[in-house]
Image (tube, coloured by chain):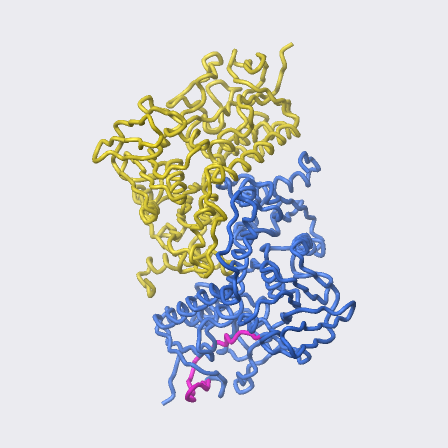
Chain colours: A blue, B yellow
Amino acid sequence: MEKKYELIVIGSGPAGEKAAVKAAYFGHKVAIIEKEAYFGGAGVHTGTLPSKTLKETALYYSGKTDKGLYGVERKLEHEASVKDFLYRKNIIVDSINDEVHQNIIIHNVDIYTGDGSFVDEHRVKVSGEKEEVIYGENILIATGSYPFQPSNIPFDQKRIHDSDSILELTNFPKSICIVGAGVIGCEYTTIFAAMGAKVYLINNRDKILPFLDDDITNELVEQMKKDGIEILFNNSFTDIEVPESDQDLIKVSMKDGDPINVDMFLFAAGRSANTRTLNCEAAGVKLGKREVVEVNEKYQSSVPHIFAVGDVIGFPALASTSMDQGRVAISHIFDINDLNKISTVLPYGIYTIPEVSMIGITQEEAEAQEIEYCTGIARHKDMPRGRIMGVEDGFLKIIFSRDDLRILGVHIIGPLASELIHYGMTLVHNESKVNDVLRAVFNYPTLHDLYKYACYDGLGNLTGHKIKK
Amino acid sequence: MEKKYELIVIGSGPAGEKAAVKAAYFGHKVAIIEKEAYFGGAGVHTGTLPSKTLKETALYYSGKTDKGLYGVERKLEHEASVKDFLYRKNIIVDSINDEVHQNIIIHNVDIYTGDGSFVDEHRVKVSGEKEEVIYGENILIATGSYPFQPSNIPFDQKRIHDSDSILELTNFPKSICIVGAGVIGCEYTTIFAAMGAKVYLINNRDKILPFLDDDITNELVEQMKKDGIEILFNNSFTDIEVPESDQDLIKVSMKDGDPINVDMFLFAAGRSANTRTLNCEAAGVKLGKREVVEVNEKYQSSVPHIFAVGDVIGFPALASTSMDQGRVAISHIFDINDLNKISTVLPYGIYTIPEVSMIGITQEEAEAQEIEYCTGIARHKDMPRGRIMGVEDGFLKIIFSRDDLRILGVHIIGPLASELIHYGMTLVHNESKVNDVLRAVFNYPTLHDLYKYACYDGLGNLTGHKIKK
C-alpha cells in the first residue's frame, strides 16, 4: 500500500534538511527524498562548505596571514600535493554529511534514496534501486541547483571544469583561467592564487561582484592584482582548444586581445534550478526563468500545498537564507507561527581572500534612491587588533543618513568580515544611529573597534571637522 | 610666566589619551603629562596589548590551533628564542606607542615629560629634566595603576617577576609558578603553557576568575588541565627560596602540600592605583581603598574641577572602558553632551587560551536575584565553521527569562570569543528575545551560528521537548 506522509521533502540540502527536521520536531510525519548517496546537497558537498574549507587550507599552506610577523617563519614539512589540498575538505564534507544524516534519522524522518518526480499533485515517484510512489499532503521542493554548462565548452572534468568537478581535481594547476566574476568565480580565483597559481579571471562586465559597494570591489580588485591575479574586464572567451597531451597548455581565445594559455579552465558563471527531472507539469507547478520554481512570500508554489525553498527558487541562493526559507515554509504549512517571514535585512558573506561582507544598502544604492547620506571608514591597520594580526589592507565602511544619523549599510573587506558583519546587521535592523555605536563599549583589542572609528570618521565627514586624514 | 590650560591630563594611557585628544578636537587648550619616555601607559606597554600579542605569538609558535588539521604539518624554521618570543610584542608596542604620540601631536596637545604632582587645586608641578608648574582650569587624573608587590616576595626582575617585568624576561622558563587567578594570572598561565612550560597556578580561592559564569570557568579549568596546567585551589605560598645559581630551581613552599620547584615565579595578584607621587592632599582630592581616586558618575573627584578616569579609579580597569570614561569625563567638563554616560552593559574579554568573553548576568547572578531563568548552549564542534576551524571544545551559553524570553546574559569560551560577544551585547542591550535571534539570518558558515543554536537549545530546555542531546 502507498505510504502516506504529512510532508514530503525533495532534497536534503540546507533548505530541505532544516525543513524536514523542523516539521518532524513538531510531531509531523515526514519523508525526505535524496537522489545522491550522501546528504546535505550542494551546501555540504559541492558549494558552500568545500570552497570555504579550501580557502582555509590555501591560507594555511601559503602562510599568507602570518608571513613575516613573528620573527621565525613556519614551513610546510613537505610540499602539499593535490591530495593534501583536498584532505581537510574531504574530512569536513564527510563529517557534516554524517551530521545531516544523523539529524534526519534522530528526528524519525523516513529517508528515500532516488530521484523524486511528481506523479500528480500529491504523489511523488522515487526512482532508486526500486521504484516507489509515496503520497504527501504537502510537498516541499528543495532540489537545489547545478552549474550551468554552456555547450561550447568541452568539459572533461580533468582540465576543463565546472564548480562541481573542480572539487575532484587531480593535478594542481600552475595556471588557470576562471570564467565568471560572481561569488563562486571570485572565491576560487583567490584560493588558486593563494596556492601559487597564475590566475586569469574573465569577466564580461566592468565590475566584479556588482551587488557590492564600489569602494569594496575596488579594494578587492587592488588586492587581487597585488596577488598577481589578472582580471580581464569587459571581455569573454570565444574558443577553447584542449591539446591532446596534458603537458601542453589549453589555449583560450578571447574576444579582445591575445589568447590565454593555461593548465586548467574553470567555468563558474551561473547555476540553474534542479527541476528538469521533477516532472513539475504532472503536479501543475509553474516554473520561471532558469527553470526556478515560482513561489510567493510563504514559499508556496502555484499549487497551494506544494512549496519550494533554497536554490531551486533562485536568488539569493545562499545556504544561510535557504535554511530559514525551509523553516519559514514549515511554519506556514503547519500553522506553527513561530517564524513566518525571513529577515528582510540579509547579510552577504563572500569568502574570498580577503573576505568581504555587507549588510544594508551600498553607496550606489543610496545615490540611486536619492538618500541624503554620509559615509565613514576605519582601516584594520589603524586598529590595535589589526596591528596584532598584521593586517595591512582592509576596512569597514558605514553609510548613514545625514538627517537622523541612522546607519543604513555596513561594508567590510578584510579578515573575519563575515563574522564582524553581524554586529552591523543589528545596527541596520534596529535602525541604530551613529551615536549608539559611540556609546557602546567593545572589548579591547578587537576588530569591532572598526565600528566605533568608522562612526567617528563619519561624524568628522558630516561636520567637515577632521584632524586625522 | 606660568602656562595656563583649560585642561591638564596626567597620564597618556588609554583613558588619558582619548580624553586629551577629544578635548583638543573640540577646540580646548590641553596639556598632557607623561612620566615615561613613551606614550600609551600600561594599555600599550605592560598590560593589554603586550599580553594579547604574546598570546598570538604563543599560538603561532605552538601551532596549537592547526595541528593535525591539514594533512601536512608546519614547523618553525628554528626553535624560538626568548628574543623571538618578544619580537612581535616589541613591534606592536613600538608602533602603537608612535600612534598614540602622533595622535597627541596632531591634535596640538602640549606634551610635558616628567612626574606630575599637585601644588594646589589648579596647579600641577612637572618634575622632569627641568621642573615646571602649569595651571589647569580643569585637571584629569589618568595615572593608571601598577602591580602590587608584597614585601615577602624577593622580586629580582630576572627569575621573580611581577606582570611588568615578565615582559622583559631574558630566559624562557621550563617551569613557572604563577600566583593569582585573576585575568592577568590566567592569561599568562595559558601563554606559558602553550609555549611548553610546566605551569603551576596558585589560587587562594576555590574558583578562578570568579566573576565568570561557573560553566565557563569549569570548562576553562578543564582545558587548562588538558594542557598540563596544574591549578592549586584554596592554597597559597608561604615562602620563596631563590638559589644562588640560576641553574638551580626556585623553591616555593606552600600552605598545604609539597613545595613547588620551578625556573620562574610570577606574582600577578592585584594592582594598586598610581596616586602615591601625585600629592593629592595639596589639591584636596580624596583617595579610597588601594589608593584609588574616588569619583562620582561624572568621574568627578571630591574637587569639582578635578576628574579621574581609568585604572586609577579602580574596577573594572579595562582599556576599553577606560577610553570611554575619558570621553565621558570630557563631555561633562566641557558640556559637550555627546556622551554623558558609559554603557551600562559592559563586555568582558579574557584573552586566555581558549578565549573567554561575557555580557550581562551569569547563571549564579540570575539565581541570586531569584530570576526565573532558562539556559541554552551550542558547541563550536557542532557548527560547520567550528568544524572547519577544527575547534574541539568551547561553547556559547545564553541565559534568558522564562517569562518573556528576554536574553539576559551571553557567555562564550572558545576562539574569537571576545569578538563574537558583541552581537550578544546588542541582544542584552536591546532587551532582545530568543525568537529575535531565530529570525536573524547569519552568514554561513560562521561562528555566529552559535547564537541561533543556543537559542534553539534554550527553547528545547524551556519546553522540555529536546530531540538532540
Q: Residue B437 appears at what percent x and percent y?
A: 46, 56
Number of marks in the image? 0
From what the image shows, is residue B351 above or below residue A202? above
Q: For this rendering, which residue is in front, A64 or B114?
A: A64
From what the image shows, is residue A320 above or below residue A422? below
Q: Residue B367 appears at what percent x and percent y?
A: 30, 44
Q: Say left or right for B375 vs A316.
A: left
From what the image shows, is residue A140 above or below residue B174? below
Q: Say left or right for B72 vs A302.
A: left
Q: Say left or right for B69 vs A166.
A: left
From what the image shows, is residue A252 above or below residue B14? below
- Name the residue at the right extreme: A257
Q: Residue B295 appears at what percent x and percent y?
A: 45, 24
Q: Residue A234 appears at what percent x and percent y?
A: 75, 65
Q: Is residue A342 visible?
A: no
Q: For this rendering, which residue is in front, A221 or B459?
A: A221
Which quadrant, please, contains the N terminus of chain B?
top right
Q: Residue at x 60, y 40 (%)?
A: A382
Whether residue B313 is in magenta: the answer is no
Quadrant in the rendering for residue B231: top left
Q: Is residue B203 visible?
A: yes
- Bounds of the magenta segment: A123-146
Which quadrant, please, contains the C terminus of chain B?
bottom left
User: Magenta region, mostly helix, strand or loop?
Assistant: strand
Whether residue A144 is in magenta: the answer is yes
Quadrant in the rendering for residue A453: top right
